[in-house]
Amino acid sequence: MTQPDGSDAPTDELSHAVETHIHGSPGRLLITCDHASANLHEPWRWHAEDQWIAKTHWAYDLGAAEITRALAAQLGCSAILARFSRLLIDPNRNLDSNTLFRSQAERRKICLNHHLTQGDRDRRISRFYLPYHDAIDRRTREAPAASLLSIHTFTPCYEGKNRSLEAGVLFTEHEALARSFAAVLSSRGYNTGLNAPYSGRDGLMYGIERHAIAHDRVALEIEIRQDIATDPRRRRPIVHALAAAVRHSLVATGPS
């Protein structure tokens, strides 16, 4: 089946909420991508007043889906990607988060999420949030030896400040593993930080951490700067670097 970016995968499944790639049998790694898409699905659509935000980092993680698909193919592992905008509902937030349905960005109102009824909230949770997490949960159970890796990207300039950081490795409990992973990226020439530009310990890797806790798995989240992630010539070498980091540190740590 042809993918949204025009590529092909050995085995895949597409639904309104989830894009799944399965390369081979359940293995030692599962990759997720919480913010892969800027899609809205009927009956939701972008308001005219929201057009300014629809293709920005507020709506999705630019380049993250392409990195996720390429990395899964290179490593021969499974990947699960969300097929809905984080502005519809953010799967990297718990259900009690005040940014589960973001109401503003850059001090501007997001019309999509103003005057939400409880019914609309419940529909988004049942149609998108829960199926996405259920797919991750199901695949994690099918791969009892798998570690978990989530791919995100970040904007090169945030609130007027340029970011020199090129990659970040987020963690909660597995600091030694994160340092080992980051060391490989650094050895490939990437300016890499730990728990930067965001910290896993601030709850900002909730999307993958919930499954790591539920299934007693190792989990890391990777952040790649978007000017690298969206440029095919620059994306290719960082995918190779990520694959090397996985082989060096992550896949050897999962349950046996």
Image (cartoon, helix red, strand yellow):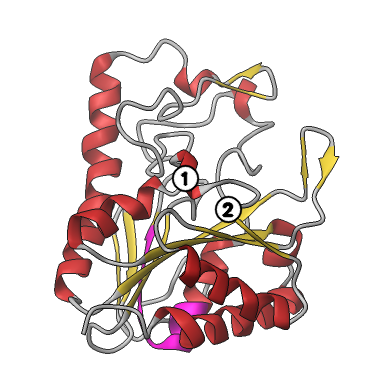
Closer to the camera, 66 or 180? 180
Element at label 2:
loop
Q: Position of residue 160 (x, y in %)?
A: 84, 34
Would you say residue 76 sits in the magenta stretch? yes
Image quarter hosting the C terminus: bottom left
- For the magenta stretch, what is the residue range? 71-81
Would you say residue 5 is visible in this rendering?
no
Q: Classify residue 190 by image quadrant.
A: bottom right
According to the picture, the residue beneath numbered tag 2 turns out to be 195
User: Which residue is at a point 34% across and 53% down the rendered structure image?
Assistant: 209
**How far apart are labels 1 and 2 at the CA level?**
8 Å
Q: Classify residue 62 by image quadrant.
A: bottom right
In the image, residue 225 above or below residue 106: below
Q: Amino acid under label 2?
A: Asn
User: Which residue is at a point 53% across and 18% down the rendered structure image?
Assistant: 111
In the image, residue 168 above or below residue 122: below
Element at label 1:
helix
Would you say residue 51 sits in the magenta stretch? no
Residue at far front of view = 176
How packed mark 1 is, by other alpha carbons closer than 10 Å (few <14, some 14-19, many 20 or more), is: few
In the picture, measured across the screen, residue 192 lies left or right of residue 255, that is right
Q: Are marks 1 and 2 in contact (CB under 8 Å)?
A: yes
Residue at far top of view = 115
How packed mark 2 is, by other alpha carbons closer than 10 Å (few <14, some 14-19, many 20 or more), is: many
Closer to the camera, 96 or 78? 96
**Considering only order in the chain, which callout, 2 or 1, is on the residue closer to the N terminus?**
2
According to the picture, the residue beneath numbered tag 1 turns out to be 201
Q: Position of residue 152 (x, y in %)?
A: 54, 57
Would you say residue 28 is visible in this rendering?
yes
Image quarter hosting the N terminus: bottom left
